[in-house]
Amino acid sequence: MKDPELDESIDRAVRELMSAEPRPGMRHRVLARLESRQVRWLTVRRLAGSLALASAVLVVFVLAGRGPETPPGDGSAALRPPLTRLEHVPGAVVPIVAERTMPPGPARGTQPALSVPDVFAAVAPDPPPAERVEAIPALEPILPLAVARLETEGIAMREFGVLPLTIDELQIEPLSPPR
Amino acid sequence: MTEGARCSDLDLVRRAQDGDTDAFGELIDRHRRAVFRAALAAVRSPADADDVAQEAFVTAYRKLGSFRGDSSFKTWLLTIAWNRALDRRKSVLRWLRQTVTPHEDADGTPRGIEHIASGRLSQEERLAGAEFQQALRRQIAALPRKMRDALLLAGSGEYSYEEIGRMLGCPVGTVKWRVFEARRVLKEKLDRKLRNLP
């Protein structure tokens, strides 16, 4: 079989395989894809931004819902004030603050600025007197554990020693005298 | 590619990097055939090649900022297109392995070539026949992938050996060797079958 003829056949077959043309309108199709991707990307970004904002608001509400911490008193080692649990508000805990020093009043005609704990305390309902639960008593101080001393038995040590080795003199039979 | 055309491609790329979609559209028009045929060599289906070509242009647009001008825009674009085509080929190939019919019969004879074994036609007539060409295309499809890719890309006439080397990620010498080997294997198989005629 002649080589050039086979070469020509191979070239012809490859040209036919690779002779296809792209469909008209490639430019429009690509630009349309780019546009739709851009729109999709903007939508995703907006959605992500909204979710982030919603998460931040939720975190603020959760943290605010824990209530304010009692302010430090006269420097003595005071325990936290007793907490009252409301039966009709599951999980809600309202701190009972014995004393509350009001900040200097605002100037006439202006609204006083409220902090988040003040807002929360303001909207939290007072428990009905008949259903007030007894305050949880403070914990008693923890005494150190008394552990009985462990009695141990003494271990009797026996005296022992190693006797020196005795090696008998080696007896070798003399060789027979040469003839 | 002439120096003037290269500068012109670079100008279009700079404008496209600044957000000029018309400039990018112009680049698409210039290189769509080369990109399409590169994809066709890998996926061997015009519909898939068209899809891959579109994806390649979209990827190139997104990565325009990373084009530094070390190579020509066409070479850079063809490398992207080839990688996208390989991804497509890998994803379809798995499915095809379960469903494709083999190119050869049980005794190793490529399907279709036995029809060429006829004593009524001359060898030249048989070579020119449509059945022979069809059988030859099947033989090309049955080549090892690396040989087939190099043969198809080189045979299309669209690319230089340097461009093919950049696409395939191998030196020019390797590309030439693969093309040579592909032709040698094809000629050997065809010659063996044609000489076995009664």
Image (spheres, coloured by chain):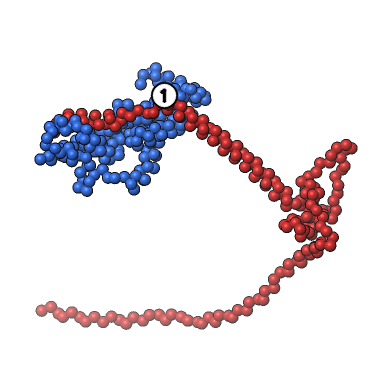
Chain colours: A red, B blue
> What residue does disc 1 label?
B29
* Horizontal side of residue A36 vs B119, given as left or right: right
Q: Is residue A61 above or below residue A131?
A: above
Q: Residue furthest top?
A: B4
For the N terminus of chain A, give its image quadrant: top left
For the C terminus of chain A, give its image quadrant: bottom left
Q: Position of residue A92 (x, y in %)?
A: 74, 55
Q: Is residue B10 above or below residue B93?
A: above
User: Visible in this render: residue B72?
Assistant: no
Amino acid at the residue labelled 1: Asp
In this view, the residue in front, A93 or A100, is A93
Residue located 34% across and 48% down the image: B98
* Horizontal side of residue B150 vs A103, given as left or right: left
Q: Position of residue A96 (x, y in %)?
A: 81, 56
Q: Secondary structure at mark 1?
A: helix
Residue located 80% across and 64% down the image: A134
Locate residue B81: give its quadrant. Answer: top left
Residue located 37% across and 28% down the image: A22
